Image (tube, helix red, strand yellow):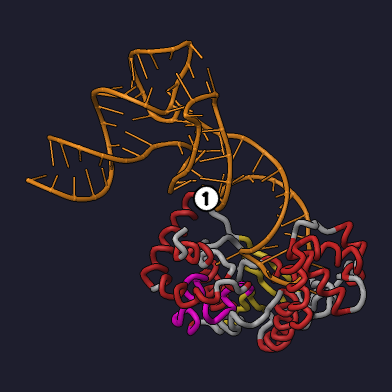
RNA sequence: GGUGCCAUAGCUCAGUUGGUAGAGCAAUGGACUGAAAAUCCAUGUGUCCCUAGUUCGAUUCUUGGUGGCACCA
């Protein structure tokens, strides 16, 4: 049994993770490690319901507003960043708290992802160009050539997956599939997961009320200011993409 | 009160030159190891507002209602 414990607080949007997380952190005198893939972007405040100044002042938060929407970020990077942070945090207190709804991020920290090499941006551009010129079929052909095993296993309609497998295969100069299946990581801490739940109709009322508050706080201006960047991955986000469509008259 | 427009899936709407209807979103189930609040796959949904006509047949055309919106008074 490790002496260090990571409490992971999960649950659907709007259920009250932020507030409960702060109260737990105050109780354990711990920091909060955010595992929210969108609150990490400093430009996305209102629409992601990121903790406000007051909440941030109550407990030290990590990974809130520390990246820009123009930065490339990923679950794998989060795994590295979070683990190295936790090394330091556990020296101060053997209970730490992770709060947020991005399940792959949480999974990466708790169970680990395989050690797949990062893809340089020039290779991402190169693969994106294949997609632009030859479409999904072009990517599928590339995958069949570079990594026949993934070609058989992957959902070939899923552009994101096919693209990533191709990118990694090029960057690593060996098939993407060879990196998979080795993730038997043990972590130097225990994991206690707490999942929050409530009746759906009440949750929906809370979410509706919260959207009204967001609008009062200036959500429309926030989204308008980001409109020109609407094609960035980081802005493919609930609450933003719908408003982009609204501004387009859809 | 008058005139006009509208009423179709949970929501926004398309459509049927008259042969009982469909997209997007939502929902539900599933997949997913560096975009994960993402992405992909599958599935259903209906008194087509009510009424009476015309018609072999009306959600579609006509009459009269009801409700909503706009304009005029």
Subunit of label 1: A
Left or right, B37 with respect to B7, comes to: right
Q: Which quadrant of the figure has residue A36?
A: bottom right
Pick the residue in front: A49 or B66. Answer: B66
Q: Which residue is mark 1?
A: A199
Give the residue at x 89% y 72%. A179
Pick the residue in front: A138 or A44. Answer: A138
> Which range is magenta?
A35-57
Reply yes or no: does residue A47 show up in magenta.
Answer: yes
Q: How many marks?
A: 1
Is there any visible trace of residue A159 in the rendered image?
yes
Q: Which quadrant of the figure has residue A140?
A: bottom right
Residue A215 % position (x, y): 39, 68
Give the residue at x 47% y 79%. A55
Is there any visible trace of residue A30 in the rendered image?
no
Q: Is residue A212 above or below residue A124?
A: above
Give the residue at x 44% y 81%. A54
Residue A248 % position (x, y): 47, 64
Residue A64 % position (x, y): 57, 80
């Amino acid at each position: 049994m490790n002496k260090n414990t990571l409490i992971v607080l999960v649950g659907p949007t709007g259920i009250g993770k932020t507030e409960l997380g702060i109260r737990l952190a105050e109780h354990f005198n711990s920091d909060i490690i955010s595992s929210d893939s969108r609150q990490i972007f400093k430009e996305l405040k209102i629409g992601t319901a990121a903790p406000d100044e007051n909440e941030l002042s109550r407990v030290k938060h990590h990974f809130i507003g520390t990246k820009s929407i123009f930065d490339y970020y990923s679950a794998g990077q989060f795994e590295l960043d979070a683990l190295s942070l936790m090394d330091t945090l556990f020296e101060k207190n053997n209970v730490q708290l992770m709060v947020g709804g991005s399940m792959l991020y949480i999974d990466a920290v708790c169970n680990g992802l395989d050690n797949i090499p990062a893809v340089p941006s020039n290779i991402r551009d190169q693969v994106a160009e294949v997609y632009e010129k030859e479409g999904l079929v072009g990517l599928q052909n590339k995958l069949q050539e570079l990594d026949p095993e993934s070609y058989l296993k992957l959902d070939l309609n899923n552009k994101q997956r096919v693209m990533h497998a191709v990118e990694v295969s090029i960057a690593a100069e060996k098939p993407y599939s060879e990196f998979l299946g080795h993730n038997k990581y043990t972590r130097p801490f225990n994991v206690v997961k707490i999942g929050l739940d409530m009746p759906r109709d009440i949750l929906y009322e809370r979410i509706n009320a919260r959207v009204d508050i967001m609008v009062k706080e200036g959500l429309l201006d926030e989204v308008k200011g980001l409109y020109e960047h609407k094609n960035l991955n980081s802005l493919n986000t609930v609450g933003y993409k719908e408003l982009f469509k609204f501004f387009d008259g859809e």
